[in-house]
Amino acid sequence: MLRAVARVAGETGVRAQLSLEETFACGVGACWGCVVPLARESAQAPNFPPVAAGETRDYVHARICKEGPVFWAHELRW
Ligand code: FES
């Protein structure tokens, strides 16, 4: 449903923030069990794990429990 909300927001030019719900294994950012792909340029993007030299992907994995749980819809890469 949140993906559909993000799509509609993008299509209509509305900036939306989404609160992603997740079952947290640790809840403190240690296990990386709650990651979501997030744009590299996002202010919420973690510096870890670092992007390797020559790697071209435009996203990083952000932990919902640590960097979130609220993200800008246009920065999620799902
Ligand atoms: S629940 Fe462990 S990193 Fe988020």
Image: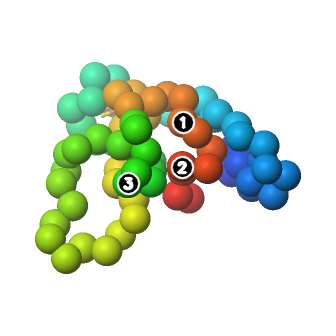
In depth, the one of 16 and 63 nearer the eye is 16
Q: What is the residue that sits farthest to the left in this orientation?
A: 53
User: To which quarter of the image does residue 78 belong?
Assistant: bottom right
Q: CA distance from mark 2 to mark 3?
A: 9 Å
x%, y% of residue 22?
50, 33
Q: Position of residue 53 (x, y in %)?
A: 14, 71
Q: Earlier in the sequence, mark 3 or mark 1?
A: 3
Where ligand 1 lies, by image quadrant?
top left
Disc 1 designates what residue?
A: 71
Q: Image height check: is 59 above or below 70?
A: below
Q: Is residue 66 left or right of residue 76?
A: left
Q: CA distance from mark 2 to mark 1?
A: 7 Å
Q: Residues within 10 Å of mark 3 (few under 14, many from 20)?
A: many
Q: Amino acid at mark 2?
A: Glu
Residue 13 on image: x %, y %: 79, 50
For label 2, the residue is: 75
Rendered view: 29 above or below 74: above
Total marks drawn?
Answer: 3
The mark closer to the camera, 3 or 1, is: 3
Q: Circle 3 sits on which residue?
A: 40
